[in-house]
Image (cartoon, rainbow, N blue to C red):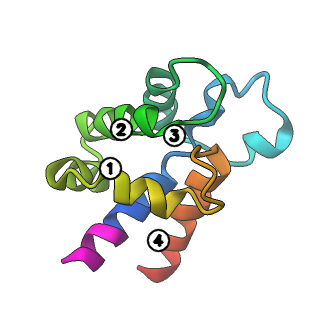
Amino acid sequence: MAQNVFSLLLWLLTSLSLVMYLSASLPLSAKQLKPTNVEIVAFVKADKNKDRVLSKKEFKIFIRAMAAFGQSTAKTIRFFGAYGYAFSVVDKNQNGIITPWELRSADNNYRVKK
């Protein structure tokens, strides 16, 4: 069960490459993340201080927004309250913030394993 939650979590988090919300002003490398409109809306809603990264608190807001949009992995994370676990999976460098690239990387890793 933890493996399923982990896999779902990774997929949702990958979709989180939402920092692209200001894609017109972001560098080309950020545009290459190709976020969906839902990801962009959820990221903008969550990124309260507009620093283009997500803290643990902002990540929880992001997951809740994605779940509200019907994203299945986000719904699973919300159901189990696995925000901390999901955050630790996505925050590869363990610096306490999640970048759009970490979100995309987590999503890509989930898709490869799926």
**71 vs 45, nearest the viewer:** 45
Q: Which mark is residue 36?
A: 3
Circle 2 residue:
60
Say if 75 sits above or below 54 in the image: below
Marks 1 and 3: CB-CB under 8 Å? no
Q: Is residue 11 in the magenta section?
A: no
Residue type, mark 3 in image: Thr
Q: Which mark is residue 83?
A: 1
Mark 3 or 4: the one toward you: 4
Residue type, mark 1 in image: Tyr
Q: Helix or strand or loop: what does disc 3 sit on? A: loop
Q: Earlier in the sequence, mark 4 or mark 1?
A: 1
**77 vs 108, nearest the viewer:** 77
Circle 4 residue:
110
Highlighted range, magenta: 1-6
Residue type, mark 2 in image: Lys
Q: Residue at x 45, y 40 (%)?
A: 56
The alpha-carbon separation of the residues under discs 4 and 2 comes to 20 Å
Left or right relative to 14: residue 57: left
Q: Helix or strand or loop: what does disc 1 sit on? A: helix
Q: Is residue 11 visible?
A: yes
The alpha-carbon separation of the residues under discs 3 and 4 comes to 17 Å
Q: Residue at x 84, y 34 (%)?
A: 27
The alpha-carbon separation of the residues under discs 1 and 3 comes to 22 Å
Measured as percent of width and height from the top left, residue 60 is found at 36, 38
